[in-house]
Amino acid sequence: MSGFGGVLPWARRTLVERDKILTSEEFSAILGICQIVPGPNIMNLAVCIGSRFGGARGALAATLGLCLGPISIVLCLALLYEHYSYLESVKGLLRGISAVGVGLIASTGFKMMRDEFRYPAMFLVVALTIIAATVFHLGLGYVVLLIAPIAIFLARKKAQAL
Amino acid sequence: MSILLSLFLKLSAFSLIAFGGVNALLPVLFDLAVNQEHWIDVQTFSDYFAIAQAAPGPNFMTVTLIGWHIYGVLGALLATFAVSWPSSIMIFFLQRFIMRMKNPLSKKTIQYSAAALAIGLVLSSAFEIALQINHSMAAYVLTIGTIAITLLTRWHPLYLIAIGGALGVLGFI
């Protein structure tokens, strides 16, 4: 619920630092796995952590707990939006927020890129993905199928080199 | 009923290829919701994107809002469920398998390749969405400024959202 700007940092603070349910290494390992699988990362994290403590039921409880509060809030905001979206100030407000929002998404990408400096050949994968998606406008599925073999080949070399 | 079914099937399919999370899927979501299915128009999409960014909680709420637009609360719940269930079930079974993988080399190979793909998809997503929702020079300056500040400082994203919103209300964006 208090996860403004994404839930991940908050999840880490609560689970690792406050409640000591997981060690820092365990958290990073689980997060690594969650980022391999497609889909909403934070939902994947909830499934992983929930299922560790309560099997399938724990996974379900964790995902519902994560979602229901924020969904209610966002729907209340949507109702407000329906009534006030004609106001010039509301339009401006949303324009400003969405410009920042795009920047935040891009910076997540740039922050993740820091790790690639350890083995710069991986930049080729990043570049090819961007070219396939933005220049050639290939569908996401084709991009993944096309780039995955190169990515796996270079990743294997990276894993061996480090 | 058929619109609910198509919402559910299409969002489920996209969830399966969304390496890098839903943010990497935004241009696809845009294309689907605005160009193909005409569920919403460009303006509503970027407004929903803004609301989802400003609200607390997971950042895939744009999907929830599109569902709400189509079919009220039921649509919202269905859309959220649709983007979540394929990967949730996949990871439920995969996590034990990967955790027990003995060979650290293959473990790292999977992790590194998925990370590189995710970076590429997230960056292209940000680029394409910026082209759709930024309509002025000032908006691009704000986007680039946000990137610079988040990379160079440790400011909480909420401050940036507040600043962006304030600039927008004052009519700069």
Image: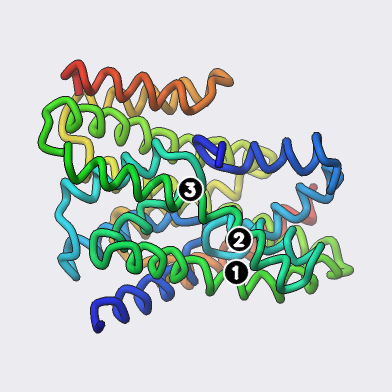
Q: Chain of mark 3?
A: A
Question: Label 2 amino acid?
Answer: Thr
Q: Identify the secondary structure beneath mark 1.
A: helix
Q: Residue at x 39, y 40 (%)?
A: B53
Residue B121 drawn above or below residue A145 = above
Q: Nearer the viewer, residue B61 or A142?
A: B61
Residue B13 drawn above or below residue A31 = below
Tag 3 and tag 2 share a subunit: yes
Quadrant showing the N terminus of chain B: bottom left
Q: Residue furthest right?
A: B102
Q: Which residue is mark 2?
A: A63
Q: Chain of mark 1?
A: B
Residue B95: image x %, image y %? Answer: 74, 68
Dot 3 crowding, Cα within 10 Å, few <14, some 14–19, many 20+: many
Question: Label 3 amino acid?
Answer: Pro
Q: Residue at x 56, y 37 (%)?
A: A2
Q: Which residue is mark 1?
A: B88
Residue A141 drawn above or below residue B161 = below
Marks 2 and 1 close (CB-CB < 8 Å): yes
Residue A109 appears in the figure: yes
Q: Nearer the viewer, residue A113 or A72?
A: A72
* Spatial separation of the CA atoms under disc 3 and disc 1: 18 Å
Q: Chain of mark 2?
A: A
Q: Which residue is mark 3?
A: A70
* Spatial separation of the CA atoms under disc 3 and disc 2: 12 Å
First in sequence: mark 3 vs mark 2: 2
